C-alpha cells in the first residue's frame, strides 16, 4: 500500500502524532512515560516545527518533527542547519517505507529552506534507525555526540544538503 506524507493540519492530527510518538518511544523502551507525557504533546510538537505524518490508506503509520530554525526543541542544529526529532513509525509499518519517506520529506524541506545540512541524534540501541540514516546519506559525526542523562551517548548524524542559508 502506498505511503503518503503530509503536514499535520489541525489539533486532531497533532494529537494523533503525539500519541503515536509516545506509544513507540515508551512502548519500545526508548524513554520513560512521564518525560514522554511532558514532551510529546500536540502543543509542544506544533510549537517545535512542522509535524509530518505518514499515512497508509488513511491510517497513521509514522510521524516526525522538522524543527523550525528557532525551535525550543532544537538541540544540535547550527545556524545553517535544520534538525528533525522524534521519528516514530508503528511496528506494523516498519520496512514499508514510512520512515524513509518521512526523512526524505525532511531533507526536501530543509533543502528548499536553504539549509546546508540536516542533523539528528539517536540512541546507540536504535540500530534500525541508524541503518535507515546511512542509506539516506547521513554520516556519523562523533565530535558532536553528547552524553544523555539516561546513561548513554547521543549519536549525532549529519546529512549534507545543497542549501545556502544566511
Image (tube, rainbow, N blue to C red):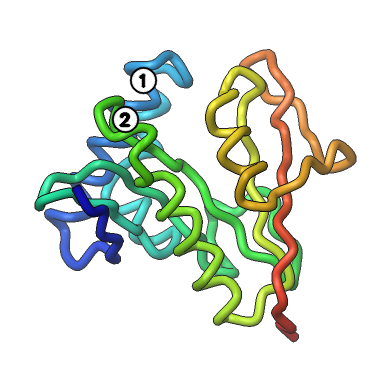
Question: What's the residue at 38%, 37% (across, down)?
Answer: 88
Using the numbered discs, state the Cα–Cα distance from disc 2 to disc 1 in whole angstroms: 6 Å
Is 91 on the left-hand or right-hand side of 69? left
Contact between marks 2 and 1 (CB within 8 A): the answer is yes
Q: Residue visible at 12% across and 54% down?
A: 12
Q: Position of residue 94 (x, y in %)?
A: 35, 32
Q: Nearer the viewer, residue 53 or 26?
A: 53
What is the crowding at mark 2: few (fewer than 14 residues within 10 Å), some, or many (at least 20)? many
Q: Nearer the viewer, residue 16 or 5?
A: 5
Q: Dot 1 corresponds to which residue?
A: 26
**Residue indicated by mark 2:** 22
Residue drawn at x 35%, y 46% is 98
Q: Secondary structure at mark 2?
A: helix
* Residue 38 in the figure: left or right of residue 105: left
Q: Which mark is residue 1?
A: none
* Image quadrant assignment for residue 81: bottom right
User: Furthest residue to the front?
Assistant: 1
Amino acid at each position: 500500500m502506498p505511503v503518503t506524507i503530509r503536514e499535520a493540519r489541525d489539533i486532531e492530527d497533532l494529537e494523533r502524532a503525539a500519541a503515536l510518538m509516545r506509544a513507540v518511544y515508551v512502548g519500545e523502551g526508548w524513554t520513560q512515560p512521564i518525560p514522554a507525557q511532558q514532551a510529546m504533546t500536540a502543543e509542544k510538537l506544533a510549537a517545535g516545527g512542522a509535524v509530518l505524518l505518514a499515512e497508509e490508506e488513511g491510517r497513521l503509520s509514522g510521524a516526525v518533527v522538522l524543527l523550525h530554525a528557532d525551535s525550543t526543541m532544537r538541540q544540535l542544529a547550527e545556524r545553517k542547519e535544520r534538525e528533525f526529532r522524534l521519528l516514530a513509525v508503528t511496528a506494523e509499518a516498519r520496512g514499508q517505507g514510512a520512515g524513509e519517506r518521512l526523512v526524505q520529506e525532511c531533507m526536501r524541506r530543509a533543502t528548499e529552506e536553504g539549509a546546508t545540512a540536516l542533523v539528528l541524534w539517536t540512541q546507540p540501541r536504535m540500530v534500525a534507525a541508524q541503518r535507515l540514516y546511512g542509506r539516506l546519506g547521513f554520516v556519523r559525526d562523533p565530535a558532536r555526540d553528547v552524553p544523555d542523562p539516561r546513561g548513554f551517548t547521543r549519536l549525532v548524524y549529519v546529512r549534507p544538503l545543497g542549501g545556502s542559508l544566511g
